[in-house]
Image (cartoon, grey):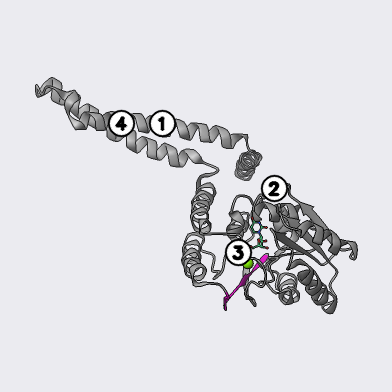
Amino acid sequence: MDVSIVVPLLNEEESLPELAAWIDKVGVAAQLSYEVIFVDDGSTDNSWKVIQHIAQSRKNVKAIRFRRNYGKSAALNEGFKIAEGEVVITMDADLQDSPEEIPELVQMIREQDFDMVSGWKKKRHDPIGKTVPSKFFNWTTRKISKIKLHDFNCGLKAYKNELIKNIEVHGEMHRYIPLIAKWAGYTKIGEKVVQHQERKFGHTKFGMSRFIKGFLDLLSITFVAKFGKRPMHLFGALGSIVFSFGFLIAGYLAYAKFFMAAYRMTERPLFYFGLLAMVIGVQLFLTGFLAELISLQSRDRQEYLYKEALNIQQENIQKK
Ligand code: UDP
Ligand code: MG
């Protein structure tokens, strides 16, 4: 199969028939063999009924339904699991993304050998309250990830099948799939300017909270990428610094008491400060140990250690 089109959706009953027909039109014209995977993310309207109806008259439609709303990332993640196409396309269900882009995206993955191609809504049809924060979001993400994309959160993207089978997307992480892909070793990331329409039916499913959640996710994803394998490098270093600081203060206070005949040491603010620093330092250290233990349990980590051991062996052989 050439293409899997994964469509996450939440309460999009009006858009779905038009979307399905449009995808068919494009797919047939481009002579692609394709499947459409609808993932109903806990819709409370008639979306699921509409999907069932769409699936009745077509053989190439798969559908998943969540019992409640788990979020767009979870929807994509489950869709990815069952995608069989050589190229996997994701697109929003609200008709803001145009299926007309599919053939060219497929071509970019196949012929130009991109691991993934992200859409860029260069001319956006969204309210200003969304476009301005989005500029800031894209700028920050670009700086942190060093990936040169203009529009990280575009719903329309194309991937090599192998890529999506090798990553996990949850929380609000769908905004950062290019980062997740890059960190998984898929570095050939392209961009394509895509058509963008105004929302025809319904309303946006992400409110203002999208910015707070997006920011927190960026922090945690950066942390995991940097220190996930070696949490002790962060906590150990911080803990050592803070503890040494407290220890120096305590040392100074002890010295002052015994050799400079200073008195009432415990009433000085510095005393509490030193005490606090030592306690926090130890706690950071212990957090580091616990984090190491947790990350040791994970499969990734064991693979990593295993590979490290292999490298060492290979070096030894070469030395002999
Ligand atoms: N969506 C989803 N689960 C959610 C929120 C949204 O599957 O919890 C889907 C939604 O139905 C649409 C796509 O994700 O197909 C993008 O959502 P929306 O158009 O509301 O986002 P916006 O275009 O405003 O960024
Ligand atoms: Mg939309």
Label 3 neighbourhood size at 10 Å, few (<14), some (14-19), many (20+)?
few
Q: Are marks 4 and 1 in contact (CB under 8 Å)?
A: no
In terms of image quadrants, where is residue 241? top left
Residue 231: give x, y in percent of width and height: 50, 40
Position of the N terminus by quadrant? bottom right
At 49% across and 72% down in the image, what residue appears? Answer: 128
The residue mark sitting in front, 3 or 4, is 3
Name the disc covering residue 276, or none: 4
Tell which circle, 3 or 1, labels the residue nearer the N-terminal end.
3
Q: Residue furthest front?
A: 45
Q: Are marks 3 and 4 in contact (CB under 8 Å)?
A: no
Cβ of mark 3 under 8 A from ligand 1? yes
Identify the residue under disc 1.
283
Up the image or down, 185 lies above or below 310; here it is: below
The residue mark sitting in front, 3 or 1, is 3
Q: Which residues are magenta?
A: 116-125
- Residue 121 among magenta residues: yes
Position of the C terminus by quadrant? top right
Tell which circle, 2 or 1, labels the residue nearer the N-terminal end.
2
Up the image or down, 16 lies above or below 313; here it is: below
| Residue in the foreground of this view, choosing between 100 and 22 | 22
Name the disc covering residue 68, or none: 2
The residue mark sitting in front, 2 or 1, is 2
Amino acid under disc 4:
Leu
Amino acid under disc 3:
Thr
Identify the residue under disc 3.
204
